[in-house]
Image (tube, helix red, strand yellow):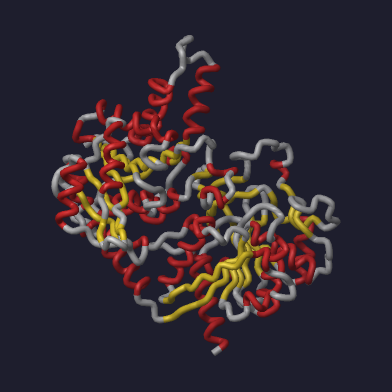
Amino acid sequence: MGTKYVFITGGVVSSLGKGIIASSLAKLLQARGLRVTIQKFDPYINIDPGTLNPYEHGECYVTEDGAETDLDLGHYERFLGVHTSKANNVTTGKIYNTVITKEREGAYLGKTVQIVPHITDEIKRRMTLLGQSGEYDIILTEIGGTVGDMESQPFIEAVRQLQWELPEEDCMSIHLTLVPFLNAAKELKTKPTQHSVQMLQQGGVQPDVIICRTEHPLTDDIRRKVALFCNVKPGHVIQSIDAWSIYQVPLNMHAEHLDELVVRKLQIENFNAPDLDRWRQFLDRLAHPSKEVDIALVGKYVSLQDAYKSIQEALVHAGAANDCKVHVHSILSEDITDSNAADYLKGMDGILVAPGFGQRGLEGKVHAIKYARENGIPFLGICLGMQMCVVEFARNVLGFADAASTELYPDTTHPVIDLMEEQKKTTMKGGTMRLGAYDCTLEKGTLAYKIYGCKDISERHRHRYEFNARYAKDFADAGLVASGHNPQTGLTEIVEIPSHPFFIGSQFHPEYKSTPEKPHPLFKGFVEAGLQYRESKS
């Protein structure tokens, strides 16, 4: 069997959940024994989301090979439990950059470079690139944006051409749309869906399946109406009703026979019935916790939940693993001062200080960390959160009053966080940080070693600044130790306070590697410590 391709588009409005639908379908196909991956094609002109403010586009997700990608790749990895790569996220910026570079090199032999065929050919090359390895049976391709957007037109045209070029049984199209409920009329309306599909058809793409996002169940009459006016077969209109958890969606899609429709359309034989036992067990633990814990998430982008999406999901995974419900209290770091920290953080069972860039809200993170350290509250600091716990300790324990990161205070006399040596000649911002997976060796006898249960680990990074090793002895003598180092460079990867019940800062991003079926050890340990702290108060 050659590689099959499934294209997923969206219409009517954005944020319908194409990434969750794609991840859910991929999970179902994987559960049938098929080799599956997902890729995301984004219409924006940025090369990648690495330079985007999280309020613009949500979090920037980092892959093992160091790609800064769309947050949907986080969903792909969490649902499938397999790694994605640079090839799994393509933007308009990458497409045009490649084509323009080739034109400058003379690759087009003097021809006028146009959207068709040059841009669409490059899109098609990227769409089929993963399939050429023979590693996958099915490749799902999510087209970002909404059908009708000017930016999306070249991608829709590329899908049209591939559907024309590939054998009919080797590709199919799924369109996700909205069926809104008008409360005044007390009825669901299908006209937006009809218009969305018509717009897709005008681009030359006929969907094989229409998935209707809805707040109320679709009646048989509505399904038949959508099928008739959108020119799809009866039974190929399915509902995606609002779910209590994104992890319920695969089971909902299976109940709607989405995976069955796909394997039949693609003429896949000898497939298994989906094995979803472990997924159901996770959902059962998630739905019926016997305990609860309150965690403060302190960051500068908390107004947008997607800004810390992977952290939020990692806490969900850790909660299920600990048989507890994690109540996440998002706190804007710039609101916290030394005098009011207790007002925001009293009653919390754990404090997580999130990553970020820039000066806004930085001192609030320092005050939150001080409160956690002095009151014995479990603390987890990630990336900038780890750097700020170093700064806080330097100021309030070592007595280095102006201790800081040179990223924001270049004139500090105590640069406890400093620019990495290899970064000092870097001038370009995009894609130049220390990115992707790096090794870390843990010190035996430390809390980090106990949590991981092994000496050698690998974690993903996204940073330019690091713990200044010049101060390592000062910190260790005062009670904050480096418990993990990169074996090649000596870079400090983890710091902790052994005298504290749970106080860990990681330079890396553990949230990127947490999945429902394999929660990350640091998050699992952090939530467990929060439960113990909660019990100690009662």
Up-down: is 397 above or below 49?
below
In the image as oriented, which residue stretches furthest toward the front? 184
Side of 248 where 360 appears, left or right: right
Up-down: is 395 above or below 74?
below
Q: Is 535 in front, or is 422?
A: 535
Q: Is 390 in front, or is 74?
A: 74
Residue 138 visible in the picture: no
Side of 524 where 262 appears, left or right: left
Side of 165 where 356 appears, left or right: right
Up-down: is 211 above or below 119?
below
* Residue 305 percent location from the top left of the image: 51, 60
* Residue 247 percent location from the top left of the image: 35, 61
Task: Please give the name of the residue rendered at 15% of the width and 50% of the height, measured from the top-left corner.
Answer: 224
Side of 445 where 203 appears, left or right: left
Assign the C terminus to one quadrant of the image. bottom right
* Residue 379 percent location from the top left of the image: 61, 71
Q: Is 493 in front, or is 341?
A: 341
* Residue 180 percent location from the top left of the image: 31, 55
Up-down: is 285 above or below 12?
below
In the image as oriented, which residue stretches furthest toward the top? 110
Residue 362 visible in the picture: yes
Assign the N terminus to one quadrant of the image. top left
Q: Quarter of the image holding residue 124?
A: top left
Task: Please give the name of the residue rendered at 18% of the width and 46% of the height, measured from the top-left corner.
Answer: 227
